[in-house]
């Protein structure tokens, strides 16, 4: 596995792969890797000839300085996990490498409502910073395939739109959320939860599952949202939002018949750690 910090070293390596007609799969991450990230590496290895992984804790997408400071950075363990997962190249740039003064990769892409609702509302500037780094990474790596997690559903929706609108020639795959046995979505932030907090946090997913059953029975999304929010609060969790949206436009949805693709999304704080999750409530087949 080739490990590099410099854009030109990475690009030399990738140029050689392309010269040999190898398709490149790419998995961008912020490190502190868990089975969710590694499932993306697996997905890439199934369709691409070589798999590139980036580890970069992007300061521009953190609206909260404490969150940035507390973000885990176990780089040695990450490299070991990627080696075992058989990634081919790991790119671990410094901030100055990603954001040089003579900036060659800049985009004014505006995701519209996709970027304003939910996470966009509660984390101002987050998606602008995320788009900034993902666009840069895509221009640097020029992958054939890009692998993203359903866990960050809104992020995946925005990147899919970014790729479409900017015409980048990359196929985007969105892979299922990997969960702990108790249903808690795996996240680098879970490391900051106590064992008790991890148990409490399992309610996040449990209520999304319960809500889906009520929604399928024909109940109104507003009533279900109210019930989910109050159940979280009764159990000492601190929800920021629960929204039921059209999975393509992210417009709010009220009833099951209102759209073909419907996703329930939430952000909930547990022990001061902000967690997000989502569940598909309807998917057209
Ligand atoms: P992050 O390191 O949090 O920026 O995540 C990097 C990629 O891994 C993103 O595409 C995430 O959606 C994805 N990811 C994070 N957690 C999970 C999970 N539990 N299951 C599947 N994919 C995940």
Image (spheres, rainbow, N blue to C red):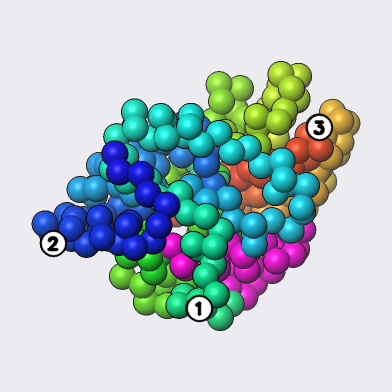
The residue positioned farthest toward the left in the image shown: 20
- The picture places residue 63, in percent across and down from the top left corner, at 74, 58
Q: What residue lies at 31% left-to-right and 70% top-to-bottom?
A: 169
Secondary structure under tag 2 reads helix
Q: Nearer the viewer, mark 2 or mark 3?
A: 2
Q: What residue lies at 34% left-to-right and 49% top-to-bottom?
A: 52
- The picture places residue 4, in percent across and down from the top left corner, at 37, 49
Callout 3: CB less than 8 Å from ligand 1? no
The earlier-in-sequence mark between 1 and 3 is: 1
Residue 110 in the image: above or below residue 92: below
The earlier-in-sequence mark between 2 and 3 is: 2
Residue position for label 1: 102
Secondary structure under tag 3 reads loop
Q: Which residues are magenta?
A: 111-137
- Camera sees residue 130: yes
Q: Is residue 117 magenta?
A: yes
Would you identify the image quadrant in which residue 69 lies? top right
The residue positioned farthest toward the bottom in the image shown: 108
Residue position for label 3: 271
Would you identify the image quadrant in which residue 95 lies? bottom right
- The picture places residue 33, in percent across and down from the top left corner, at 50, 36
Residue 179 in the image: above or below residue 1: above
Q: Work out how far the residue at label 2 is from the one at label 3, CA to CA, in angstroms.
A: 50 Å
Observer-nearest of 196 and 92: 92
Callout 2: CB less than 8 Å from ligand 1? no
- The picture places residue 102, in percent across and down from the top left corner, at 50, 78
233 relative to 265 in the view: left or right: right
Dot 2 surroundings within 10 Å: few (below 14), some, or many (20 or more)? few
The earlier-in-sequence mark between 2 and 1 is: 2
């Amino acid at each position: 596995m080739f490990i590099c910090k410099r854009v030109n070293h990475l690009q030399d390596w990738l140029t050689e792969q392309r010269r040999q007609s190898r398709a490149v799969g790419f998995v961008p991450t912020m490190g502190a890797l868990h089975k969710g990230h590694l499932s993306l590496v697996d997905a890439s290895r199934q369709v691409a000839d070589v798999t590139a992984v980036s580890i970069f804790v992007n300061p521009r997408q953190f609206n909260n300085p404490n969150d940035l400071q507390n973000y885990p950075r176990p780089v040695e363990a990450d490299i070991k996990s990627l080696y075992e997962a058989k990634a081919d190249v790991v790119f671990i740039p410094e901030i100055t490498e990603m954001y040089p003064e003579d900036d060659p990769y800049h985009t004014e892409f505006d995701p519209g409502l996709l970027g304003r609702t939910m996470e966009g509302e509660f984390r101002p500037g987050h998606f602008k910073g995320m788009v900034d780094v993902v666009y840069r990474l895509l221009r640097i790596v020029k992958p054939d395939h890009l692998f993203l997690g359903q866990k960050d559903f809104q992020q995946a929706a925005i990147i899919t739109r970014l790729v479409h609108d900017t015409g980048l020639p990359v196929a985007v795959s969105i892979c299922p959320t990997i969960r702990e046995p108790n249903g808690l979505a795996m996240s680098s932030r879970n490391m900051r939860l106590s064992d008790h907090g991890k148990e409490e946090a399992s309610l996040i997913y449990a209520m999304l599952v319960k809500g889906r059953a009520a929604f399928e029975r024909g109940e109104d999304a507003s009533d279900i949202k109210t019930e989910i929010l109050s159940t979280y609060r009764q159990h000492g969790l601190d929800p920021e939002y629960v929204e039921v949206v059209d999975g393509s436009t992210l417009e709010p949805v009220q009833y099951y018949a209102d759209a073909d693709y419907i996703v329930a999304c939430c952000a909930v704080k547990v022990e001061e750690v902000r967690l997000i999750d989502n569940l598909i409530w309807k998917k057209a087949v």
